[in-house]
Image: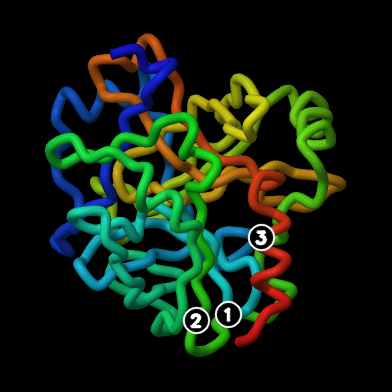
Amino acid sequence: MSTRLLTALLLASLIPAAGAGPLSAERRTLFFGHDDRVRVHPDHGPWQAIGQLETASGNLCTATLVAPDVALTAGHCFVGPHGRLDPARRFTLALDGRNSARHAAASRVWLDRRLLRGLIRQGDDLIVPPAMARYDFAFVRLAAPLLAAEHTVAPFDGNRAALRRALTQAHWRVSQAGYPEDYPDRLMLHRHCRATRLEADGRLAHRCDTLPGDSGSPLLLEVAGQPRLIAIQSSAPDARWRYRADNMALSTPSFQPALRRFLAGPK
């Protein structure tokens, strides 16, 4: 199977609350030769807007507040067995160890239903064909706001050409933060990891260290002195094919129009 044609996606799975466990050799292969992640406390800057999303079946993903009561994440987080919708249950903000500043129930999820029909299940994994990657995003309306608007993370406001210019100016260095399977209750950051290419369909290839649980996590870029969410983590190749493919995120210009409509819609 060519990972240029079909990219294996590790399904966001139920992660035990017991904490970190040793990673298998296969999991360690997903890092690009070295684990460059560091723990960051989610009490300041853009990190305070990043939290953990739980679905009805217990799947865990990472999500980011882009409005006081709206979290952005990957659409595949809500794909349950047999391709059915797995509803969002709760969003926990500022999770750090066993402490959490606050959480809110999810009241509504929007995702493109084409994603439900287009993903491929292979054992315990999901496959995201490139034709489906453009739909791998979701918006979650929360039952209550969790942050003031000025503390949320603003998505990049520009088209693909503008994003390419911003990446070039930053030497294609971005930062990624999420709640991975080996540290499900700690926010782990890979600072200044390398984005490698921006595809015509909006996919952003990158070499940030991610694991299951990081699905939907933000890739951030400093633009005019402010952190901007430029993409969300979507997929990673099977460990066997790591040498042939980078991770894939979906860039913000791909879903910005849909996000604007959702933010302007009913609460």
Q: Earlier in the sequence, mark 1 or mark 3?
A: 1
Instruction: Tell me: 158 left or right of 22.
Output: right
Q: Earlier in the sequence, mark 2 or mark 3?
A: 2
For label 3, the SS is helix
Residue type at the position of mark 2: Leu
Q: Which mark is residue 53?
A: none
Quadrant of the rendered structure where residue 210 is? top left
Residue type at the position of mark 1: Asp
Check if mark 1's residue and mark 2's residue have beta carbons within 8 Å: yes
Return the x and y of residue 98 as percentages of the image width and height.
27, 71
Q: In this figure, which residue is indicated by the disc labeled 3?
A: 258
Instruction: Tell me: 57 left or right of 143.
Output: left
Q: In this figure, which residue is indicated by the disc labeled 1?
A: 69
Q: Of residues 32 and 124, which is closer to you in this image?
A: 124
Question: Where, quadrant-wise, is the N terminus in this rendering?
Answer: top left
Residue type at the position of mark 3: Ala
State the CA–CA distance, disc 1 to disc 3.
Answer: 16 Å
Please report the residue visible at 48 percent of the width from the left and 43 percent of the height from the top: 233
State the CA–CA distance, disc 2 to disc 3.
Answer: 18 Å
Check if mark 2's residue and mark 3's residue have beta carbons within 8 Å: no
Question: Where, quadrant-wise, is the C terminus in this rendering?
Answer: bottom right
State the CA–CA distance, disc 1 to disc 2.
Answer: 5 Å
- Which residue of the protein is positioned furthest toward the right in this rendering? 224
Q: In this figure, which residue is indicated by the disc labeled 2?
A: 142
Return the x and y of residue 82 as percentages of the image width and height.
19, 54
